[in-house]
Image (cartoon, rainbow, N blue to C red):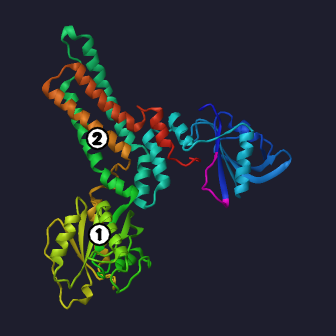
Amino acid sequence: MRDDTIAAIATPPGSGAIAVIRVSGPKTFEIVEKIFKPLKPKKLSQQKGYTIHFGEIHDHDQTIDEVLVSVFHAPHSYTGEDSVEISCHGSIYIQQKILELLVNAGARIAQPGEFTMRAFLNGKMDLSQAEAVADLIAAQSEAARKVAFRQLKGGFARELKQLRQQLVDFVSLLELELDFAEEDVEFADRQQLLQLINRIKERIELLTSSFKLGNAIKNGIPVAIVGEPNVGKSTLMNLLLKEDKALVSEIPGTTRDSIEDVISIKGILFRFIDTAGLRETTDVVEAMGIERTKEKIRKAQIVLYLIDARDKNWKEKLEQIQDLIEDQKLILVVNKIDLLKQKVDFQIDEDIDVVYISAKYNQNIKDLEEKLLKAIDYKSFNESDIIITNVRHYEALKRAYDAVLRVIDGLNSGIPNDLLAQDVREVMFYIGEITGEITTDEVLGNIFSKFCIGK
């Protein structure tokens, strides 16, 4: 399949001002030249790379569109192959017609992610960088963009490759010792290996600990806003979203189902869920909403529990909500402080953050936003830190970590070289899985099938 020349529309579906059609493969110039007539009569294959050329797309003697064609010569292209990008007018008909002409001229419709897969197979990027391309396209916040772009630059993979190469060197020496087992010689310095393994162990611990934040940055942090009816949940939701998303009424039980929307706070995406008020009710529909509230609490990462600042029974109610909490972060939000004649102080467990607000008058909302950022430990990572956002990377690192512990135990207990070498090879294998040095067609197919077709 790598010998085929592929083509696909690279811009989103639908009409627009312009659209881009990508072509890549060994016969790129030959195929495009069959349908493209440049303003200046010179073949695309003879043009310099990184140049753009004006001309027309023709179907025999019929002109289809005026276009710009960008030229990229192998290996200096995204895929590492000869490539062109045709910028045409954004008519759906024109896009499909040009694609049809390219296929008739000898191209094949690209599969999802095939351009990026070819970039990986041609050594233009490693597998973790290829996955970062998809993350960059899907980024919905500044933090997600930064994390994806940092991984795309390859610092994460370079570090892993260096550590893996050092392990390769040690395994080679260990296996050399097996060839001279009868002579009782030692080529691999066990102390140096232990120092290297401990460095890898510390690095893996740091990377895996970043996954909770990374996953939140990538997918958004689910935040459930819960409390009794009329404590101001919907008002707070509307205030955070800066729009009237939730219906606000003094009638208890107005919110009967969950309402969700997202906002970005300092580049971090939060998914807020305004839930039905928690109370005893005989209304069947409202009761169903309350059950959904409990389900949303279980699925949330952060729970904002709102209470009325004048409520004298808040401690009992807080204990009831704590019974529904597992490992979620609970923040007690004391609302309607504008109705108090004097300041109050809610003394509670140190593990629970408290913030005093007036949702009606937009008081202390910035304090609440700071509590939300604190809850995900946002400030514990520097801008330059590598943050793991990919579940596949996280799982591979966890397996590598288990193998690292076995190597350390083996070095301390003096196990035979063949068993020690096997454990070191396992560490190498799982690290290599992340960068693509060790991979299978099934893994590649699973990764790239999630890409859009034009990428």
Position of 47 with respect to 416 (left or right) is right
Q: Residue at x 17, y 65 (%)?
A: 351
Secondary element at tag 1? helix
Secondary element at tag 2? helix
Examine the structure image and report whether residue 16 is included in the region drawn in magenta: yes
Quarter of the rendering containing residue 176? top left
Mark 2 is on which residue type?
A: Lys
**Which residue is tagged 2?**
398
Q: Residue at x 47, y 52 (%)?
A: 136
What type of secondary structure mainly makes up the magenta span? Answer: loop
Query: In the depicted view, which residue is nearer to us: 89 or 161?
Result: 89
Q: Residue 228 at x, y = what percent?
A: 27, 77
In the displayed orientation, state which residue is furthest to the top: 182
In the image, which residues are magenta? 8-17
Position of 31 with respect to 80 (left or right) is right
**Which residue is tagged 1?**
370
Q: Residue 224 at x, y = what percent?
A: 32, 68
Count the marks. Answer: 2
Q: Residue at x 18, y 78 (%)?
A: 314
Q: In this picture, is 281 found above or below 212?
A: below
Quarter of the rendering containing residue 392? top left
